[in-house]
Each structure stands twice: as C-alpha cells, then as structure tokens.
Image (spheres, rainbow, N blue to C red):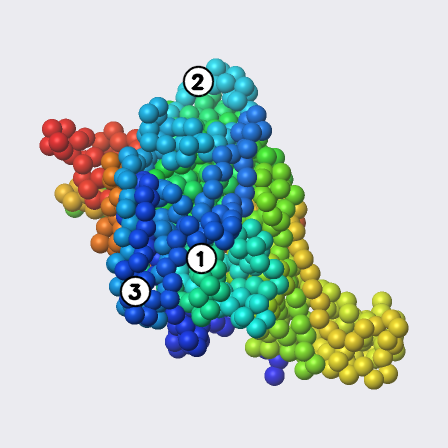
Amino acid sequence: MSNIIGIGESPRRKEDFRFLTGRGNYVADMKRPDATVGVFIRSQHAHAVIRSIDTKAALALPGVEAILTGDDVAADGLGGMPCGWGISNAEGLPMKEPKFPMLAQGKVRFVGDMVAFVVADTLAQARAAAELVVIDYEVLPAVVGVLEAVRPGAPQLFDDVPNNLCCDWEMGDKAAVAVAFRKAAHVARLSLVNNRLIGNPMEPRSAIAEYNAGTGHYTLWTTSQFPHVVRFLMAALVLNIPEQKLRVVAPDVGGGFGVKQFHYGEEAVITWAAKRVGRPIKWVADRSEGFVSDRHGRDHVTEAELALDENGKFLALKVNTLANMGAYLSTFGPNIPTNLYAPLLGGVYTTPVIYCNVKVVFTNTVPVDAYRGAGRPEATFVVERIVDVAAAEMGIDRVEIRRRNIIPKEAYPYQTPMLVEYDSGDPMGCLEGALVAADVAGFAERKAASEREGKFRGLGYSTYVEACGLAPSRFAGRLGARGGLYESATVRVHPTGQVTVLIGTHNHGQGHETTFAQIISEKLGVNFENVDIVFGDTDRVQFGMGTYGSRSLVVGGAALSKAGDKVVVKGKKIAAHLLEAGEQDIEFKEGVFSVAGTDRSKTFQEIAGAAYVPHNYPLEVLEPGLEEQAYYDPINFTYPGGCHIAEVEIDPETGIVTLARYTAVDDVGTVINPMIVEGQPHGGIVQGVGQALFEGAVYDEVSGQPLSGSFMDYTMPRADHVPNMNVQTHSTLCTHTPMGVKGCGEVGTIGSPAAVINSVVDALSHLGVQHVDMPATPNRIWRIIQNATMPQAAE
Ligand code: MCN
C-alpha cells in the first residue's frame, strides 16, 4: 500500500519509538571491550600559575594506567585547540589568538580548566588517583566581568594580550550615524546586560576513544553536533594524524543547543591518550563538570542609542557592546558577538544607518560560544528593548511605533545597512496576526482583573528577524570563517527501491529522521517507512558541516533535495531505455516513470531494480547503480522572523513573575512538518523564558569562583513555568532555497527574551520602571518594586 508522506504533513516522528522505548544509542551507555575510564582533573582556581604537579603517589595506586599533563602534550609537540573563525579590527589587524592548550601549560585561567587526565581500570580508581595528584598553584588575582577586565590595572590573562582585549571590532557607518544623531528630535538610551547562560543539555558530554594498533586507526565516539568538523580539526590541527585514520561517531545525542557544536579539548585528550594507554578510554562528564566546562553563552554588556525624528521614525542606531569570551577562544567564539550579532541590529525596521562596536574581551571564566540563537537573541534584545524605551519616552504606543518603522512586505528584498539583504518577509503580517492571536484587544480587561487581585499585568512585543541557515561560504569567508559552510547529502537507492540517505547534518532532537524522510518520500514517491536517514558517522557519511545555526533543513535539506532531483534525472534515463522512449518524453510523478501521452510506465521500484540488474543496459551511456550525491552552498542566509507577544502577571508581594500567556507567529517559509514546526518554537521559547526569568551564570568577582555551579543555584525553566503557548506560522517563501524553506530551530530563543522582559517592564511601567535586566528573578523584581514604592526599604 502506498504511504507517501510529503511536505506539509505531520507523521509521528520516526526517531521517537527508539527514544521512548529506551533504545537510544548514547555514548555513556556504550561498552567497549577492555575499556578504561578517564577522569579530568580541573583547576579549582580561576587564575593561577602551576608550579608543579606531583603524580607519583597517584600512579602507584592499583589500576592506574596513566596520568597525563600539559607537559606530556608539549613533549609530543601537539597543537592547541583551534578557533574556526578569525575576526579583525577596523584597521584589519587580526584578533589576538592566544594558545589554548589541550591540557593547561604553566597557568590555569578558569575554574574548570583541564590540568591533568587520569586513566584507570575503574571510575573509582581514577577518582581516587585524581585525589592523590598534588598540584602546587600560585594563585593570581582573577577578573570575571568585561567592564573590569578592560580597566587599567586589571589582572592580565595573557602576556601578549594587552587589556585582555581580543579584538576591538566594528561594523556600520560611524560617520553617517553621527550625522543622523545630530538631526534627531529624540534620542533613546539604554544600558543592558545580556546574562551569561549555561546550556545544560539533558545528556552530559561524553566520549569513548579507541586506537587499533594493527591498522593505525582511531575511533572517537563523542556527543557532538558536527563529527566531521571534529575529525578534521583534531586530525589536521591538534593531533597531527591522517584524517582517514580517524573515525568520529556522534550517535544519538541527548540535546545539543549549541553546547555540543565545538571541538573540545576533552575529545582530543582522550583520543591521544587511547593510543598511549593502548586500551579504549571512556569519559562521561558529570553534571557539575558540565557547569564548568561546557561552553557558556551570551554575556554582553551593552550601551545602545536610538535616534528618532519627531514622528517616531528611526534615524540611526548606535550600539557599543563588550562581549565576554571567557578564558580562551572556543571554536566559533569570536564570531558569535560580532558577525552573528551586529548584522541583525536593523531588526525588522527601516533604520537607515547603524553602527556597532564590539569589544571582545578575555576573562577568567569558562569560554563563551554559541548557545541556541547565538548572537541573534542578543541583537533582538537590544533592538526590541530600545524600541520600547523610545516609545515610552515619546509617548507613542508600542505597536504604533513598530508599525511606523517596520519594513513593508513590498520592500523585500530589503538591503539593510548592515551587510545582509533580507530576501523575503512580512513582519507587519506577523505583527497583525499576533495581535489577534494574543487577544490584545482583551488585555485591558485581563489587566483590570489582575489589579483587582493586587497583581500587576503587562504585555510585551518582540517583532524580530534572524539570519539562519549558516551560511553562504563566500559570505562567511569574507567575515573570517576558516572553513566552508555548505552541506552534503547522498541518496542511495537500493535494488528494492528502498532508500538510505546519508547526510552531513546531525540530528539531536530536531526530528531530521522524519522531516528528511518526508522530503524524499514525496520527491521519489517512496513509502515514508522505506526511507532511512543516516548521519553522525564520518566512516559512513561524506564530509558535512553538521548542525547549528538552524541550517539543517535550509542547507542540508537543500542538498538532499538536489540529490533527490539527480536520482529522478538518472531514473528517467533508465526508464527511457526500458520503455524505448526519448528521455525528454519521460514524466515522473508519485513514484511512476511514464512515457508522456501513453500508458507505458515503470514504477520507481522497477527502475531501481533495473539499475542494479543491468542486463541489456546501454553501458556506454548509462552506469549501473542508482545513488546520487549533492553539495549545496546557499547564496544567502534565510531570514525567519515573526512577532512574539508575552503576557505576565507579577505578584508585588513576592516579586514572582508568572508567564500568563504566550503567542508566537513565526515566518519559517515552507513548513515541512507542521507538528515539528510547532514543537521547535515551543522548546526555544521555554529556553528564552529561562534566560528572561530564571537563568544566569554568576561568578564571584574577587575569586572568580562560579557561584551557580549546580541546579541548586542555576534555575532552569520547568513545565509549570510556562502556559499553553499559542504558536502559529505566517509564512513568506524564501526566494533562494529549493523548497522555499527558512529555519525554525532558533526562532523561539530569539524572539522570546525581549517579549518577556518587555511585558515585565510594561507591568511595572506605572512605577516609572524603564528597564529590567535578565533574569527577572523574584528577588530582582521585588527590589525594583520596593525601590520604586519605598526607596529605603530595599536597602
Ligand atoms: N523544519 C520544518 N519546516 C521548516 C523549518 C524546519 O519542518 N520550515 C524542521 C526541520 O526539518 C527539522 C526541524 O524543523 O526537523 C528544525 O530544523 P532547522 O530549523 O533546520 O534547525 P536544525 O535542524 O538545524 O536544528 C538546529 C537548531 C539549533 S541551532 C539548536 S541550538 C537547536 C534546535 O535547532 N537545538 C536543539 N532545536 C533543538 N531541538 C532539540 N530537541 N534539541 C536541540 O539540541
């Protein structure tokens, strides 16, 4: 029976059966024969010189195989951890790029920095040995905040990085902005902090490494979003081993959210150590280790100014940001607060000139890199907050000021002043749709009802745009990317007509096994259950760039679509031969090749069979087999956008903010699977609500100790923190992706923090409150209310 499930349908997710029945294949559950266990010894100091490391007593313990330190790394002449993106300042001078050793050499620079690696027969033995390693530190003063790090006299992390400044980066037309500000009728100003976040995917990072002395091959199983990139970086730049002798497998991964899209030192150390020890090694991070070693996200301090004319039209935007890089440059680190941030400062508005300066700064904290949204939530937060500040100061309604400045649908494609050109969009349509969906008309009544109970109620808007589908390689190359950003797919049609897809993206929760199967089921007319999606294994899948930046459908899906087209082209050649017709006369529809205008036809299965049983085959013009591969490099980003409306209720007695209603109308282009396109924003919105109301990585400013190193001190949002959300789409088609698709994986985290904080500020606006920094915890809100009503009480 035919079961073609195509674009626009919502079948059950293929992958869920194995997850829901406990059959997932996670690294921590894997067992290798004769495996040892590895434990990292991490610095408990934020900044210190390593005077000596004494491993003698530890090595004497039973079961201990090896204890490796930075000296061993240096003795083997190995490289440091590479950064995949190089930025430069306005004069073209490259960023400061200090060495990031696999294991600390001479100095530690954050709590969690790796000092030694202990390998033993069992976890208990490895931990016992780690306890006996004596490390003599000379503790140095530490600096954790960006403002403090660039002050004269601040502790210096690296001798050759003056003022801890990695790069003084800029984008936009500074002179034109200055001219526009001189003409402004009003200037709105805002200082804000974008709080540091810890991703906390459900599955902690883990790895198993194995070396085969017979063949010289290494295998690394790792919790990664991009196994091919890990293989390339590790083989070519870190361990200097032949790339073809290294297999990297990223099997089922229990959530990534960006945290697993970097090449981590742990991966390199364990692979290197596996050869030295001569046995497989397994390392599984515990949750506390994740807090101080998973890359953190966000952490900006920003001053923004918006110039407006007397009618509330935006004339210019000026943004100065200090971005925290942590102690070292992670794989994408410097790219996030610069190239993924400044180009989106135009938002959905016609602001004609923009200037952005970003000081990228080293501090004694965990390295900072991409976390879901990566740069774009930060940009959206700046823009959507300052628009609200301007509206309040000028006495213009917040929807009205947006209407006056939003790019009209007819103006697309729209060239922004910050490099990017939005190909399509309808932000006004999203706004109008969201106003209805959120029942904004009924807000006054709901507010009055809250007031009767002594509560404050607020409504917040975020009309946002983002750039996803990373990335046009040419564009990225101009901006400092040290690699390409295309994607690859192979469609392997078996003799039975069943299909295996090999794709370079990685599925760690987004439903690729379902949506990619839908694309092929529709394109080839093959039953949905007869399409399998394979990813995450460098020995099985051709080189691919992996998953991040909501690129899997836009870039990977496009490669897949192209490869599927090639299969159809070849199928037509085979059909023409079998049906004794001209190739141009062959039509293909719903799995059947037919000669136009006749009843002569062959099914897809018959064609596949013939491809592998080429009796009577014109071999001089047709090769046997039916397998096609395509690489796709986009010509532009895609620009999903939309309008999010949050409604909160605040209890002034406790400061607790309750998210009462949440509405999102997102433009994600063609929707492949409506159920997944509802689920992705759901998850993203909850993460954005987490940033706005609960989460924040905090360090002690003097010692550099993390103060939020466990779930006791770092609040993740829970199911009862969010209401039923109203998530809808209002799509315009992307003009350059094969299926008109735009990404949807990050829209939730990008749109929501501003919507939530704008609603919190609205709820407190009668107290004269103009801004609230994230997270809007009960403590913070209670103090704000106390300060506004009884100034002395908050002290
Ligand atoms: N999709 C669709 N129609 C569209 C757009 C997308 O049906 N118009 C489908 C896609 O086919 C895919 C899913 O929606 O099944 C998400 O697609 P896409 O926007 O391409 O995003 P990616 O698959 O590249 O996922 C990455 C993105 C990012 S950057 C983070 S971080 C993230 C996220 O998505 N991490 C996640 N969503 C996550 N979801 C889960 N469960 N776990 C994570 O770690």
Which residue matches tag 1? 269
Q: Which mark is residue 185?
A: 2
Which residue matches tag 3? 60
Quadrant of residue 577 within the rendered picture: bottom right
Whether 307 is drawn above or below 286: the answer is: above
Q: What is the C-alpha distance between the residues marked 2 and 3?
A: 76 Å
Q: Nearer the viewer, residue 348 or 123?
A: 123
Specify the amino acid type for callout 2. Answer: Ala
Specify the amino acid type for callout 3. Answer: Ala
Whether 600 is drawn above or below 225: the answer is: below
Q: Is mark 1 within 8 Å of ligand 1?
A: no
Task: Give coordinates of residue 627: x percent, y percent.
Answer: 71, 71
Front: mark 2 or 1: 1
Q: Say which residue appears at 56% left-offset and 29% top-offset.
A: 93
Task: Give coordinates of residue 764: x percent, y percent.
Answer: 25, 36
Q: Earlier in the sequence, mark 2 or mark 1?
A: 2
